[in-house]
Amino acid sequence: MKAVYFAWVRERIGKNEEEIAPPPEVATVADLVAWLTKRGENYAYAFDKPQVIRAAIDRAHVAHSAPIAGAREIAFFPPMTGG
Amino acid sequence: MGAVRVQAEDFDAAAEGRALAAGRPDVGALASFVGLCRDEGGRLAALEIEHYPGMAEAEIARVVAEAEARWPLIGVTVIHRHGRLTPGDQIVYVGVAAGHRGEAFAAAEMLMDYLKTRAPFWKRATRVDGSVEGWVEAKEGDDAQAKRWGGG
């Protein structure tokens, strides 16, 4: 699946997007955050307060408890500040 | 029914309002809101607005659909800009045409409250001295404003 990052999550990780292949035991958005966090200091920095991170699957908001099975694109970003 | 545009270009709020009412003699009320880039007491030089292409349009369309399900609206237009904006620039337009003012005002306010908390846009501020102030933080008050409408 494709992971995409925005705003300071993107800056901290140092990538706009990447292909990821988490193992099958990574079932939910929260699991994926924990799995990504272990990939390096940049990820750990981006996800150091996981409760503030928002997620979207295939361009719709989801909770951290949402399953990721079948997702084509999963996005991580800070709380939104538009308008 | 609602029109949603996410664009770098400026917009003409008066023309958008006229278009909402054109050919619709049943429109009795047109409520419009324009959000502008503020200078924060002379400190702010510019806002860089980042967005999630594709999701920004989709999420605004979902918010518009919720407003249309809630009130009898005749037309809705939402425009949100991205890119570099400076104080005085227009950022966002919400226009609602309805039969009566009650639903037009209420829908415009709900749309703005939901846009602030759900539409995937992020602002980064640059100061007049050229330094980057950083990403604008979301306000808890915005969440409270959005929750007034239930759901969301």
Image: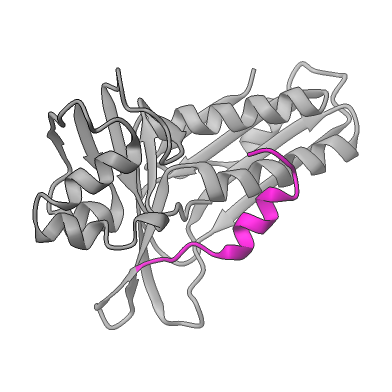
Residue sitting nearer the eye, B92 or A69: A69
Residue sitting nearer the eye, B65 or B11: B65
Q: In this rendering, would A31 be left or right of B82?
A: left
The residue lying furthest to the front in this view is A25
Res A70 seen here = yes
Q: Residue at x 47, y 56 (%)?
A: A81
State the image quarter where residue A42 is shown.
Answer: bottom left
Return the x and y of residue B67 as percentages of the image width and height: 71, 31
Q: In this rendering, would A12 be left or right of A73?
A: left
In which quadrant of the rendered image does the N terminus of chain B lie?
A: top right
Return the x and y of residue A68 as percentages of the image width and height: 32, 27
Range shown magenta: B135-152
Q: Residue at x 43, y 37 (%)?
A: A65
Return the x and y of residue A64 as percentages of the image width and height: 41, 41
State the image quarter where residue B12 is shown.
Answer: top right
Colour mapping = one colour
In the depicted structure, whether residue A67 falls above or below residue B134: above
In the depicted structure, whether residue B1 falls above or below residue A33: above
**For residue B130: magenta?**
no
Q: Residue at x 24, y 33 (%)?
A: A26
Residue sitting nearer the eye, B77 or B24: B77
Q: Residue at x 10, y 61 (%)?
A: A41
In which quadrant of the rendered image does the C terminus of chain B lie?
A: top right
* Total residue callouts: 0
Res B52 seen here = no
In the depicted structure, whether residue B74 falls above or below residue B85: above
Q: In this rendering, would B54 be left or right of B4?
A: left
